[in-house]
Amino acid sequence: MSETIDQFDAEAVIAVFDRGNEAMLDSRYREKSIVRLPGQGRLLVTGDLHDNTIHLQKILRLAKLENAPDHHVILHELIHGDKLLNGMDFSHRMLTKVALLVLDHPDQVHPLLANHELSQLTGRGVSKGAGNSLDLFNQALEYVYQDAWQRVADAINRFIRAMPLALISDSGILCAHSLPASKALMKFDTDIINRDLKNEDYHYPYGSAYLMVWGRAHDQVLYETLAKKWNVKLFYLGHQHVETGIESKGFSPGVIVLNSDHERATVVDLDLAATPDPEEALLTAIPLVSVQIDPSR
């Protein structure tokens, strides 16, 4: 990461989030509410991170963004970890790191909207088991930035609003935090990937962005419907706890679910020119425990 800032300087942090916001929206691969990648290059697919900064370092080592401009990485579910400091959640620092990464590599680093970021944006409560994550997050902002905390929070919300819903490659890969529940498909706007997000898309109960990032309980009909509509051959998703770090759901088209936050965390390094293959994804998944870094950096 070439650019650094004083994490305690509210003005500097606000500026980074606003510049990161603009960089995401101005990325050469941004198309309305998604990122559209050509069928060439490499993509490192990750799962939920939940403020695991060590795993973020390992992911960046694997992504090798500096080696070639067509190396890409997705990042999602960044905030609201389960490790509190003095009873507060300081995961805004993870968002700041990611905003800086977007500025360093605006066409290569792709943060995707996830349910915890959406909850922070809309103020709708969510928990990782230690209390209301929104309150814990905001308490840390107020502790660090004092009278300026609300302005920092507003800049974070603008950054979250700029996040795309999904990444889709010309070779048929779709990466997203989740998909709408099967029972909500009739309420979901499948054309959302072809337009900009509107305010109502983010809100409970029937906003289409809300339905997508919070969705669970998917069935064959859902995958077939979205695969046909969006020209997808293989889905990569998060939003589910996978004990082994990665699993195939056994549907057609293929569905892979990953976690990148816990002790068996995994990622997948994809050749965007290759035909998607769920079984190959399982066999070539990279356990993050196998990646060596200097944790002091």
Image: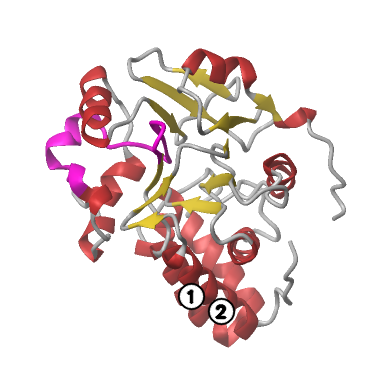
Question: Which residue does the image show at 41% across and 17% down from the upper left?
Answer: 249
- Residue 218 found in image quarter: top left
Provide residue 223's location: percent of width, then percent of height: 28, 25
Circle 2 crowding by C-alpha within 10 Å: few under 14, some 14–19, many from 20: many
Residue 46 is a magenta residue: no
Residue at point 72% right, 32% down?
288
Foreground residue among 59 and 82 = 59
Q: Amino acid at mark 2?
A: Ile
Is residue 89 shown to the viewer in this render? no
Using the image as rendered, state which of residue 147 and residue 291 is in the foreground.
291
- Residue 210, numbered label: none
Q: Quadrant of the C terminus?
A: bottom right
Q: CA distance from mark 2 to mark 1?
A: 6 Å
- For disc 1, the neighbor class at 10 Å (few under 14, some 14 to 19, many from 20) is many
Residue at the disc numbered 2? 14
- Counting every numbered tag in the picture gives 2
Residue positioned 62% across, 38% down in the render? 261
Residue, disc 1: 155
Q: Which residues are magenta?
A: 169-191
Q: Earlier in the sequence, mark 2 or mark 1?
A: 2
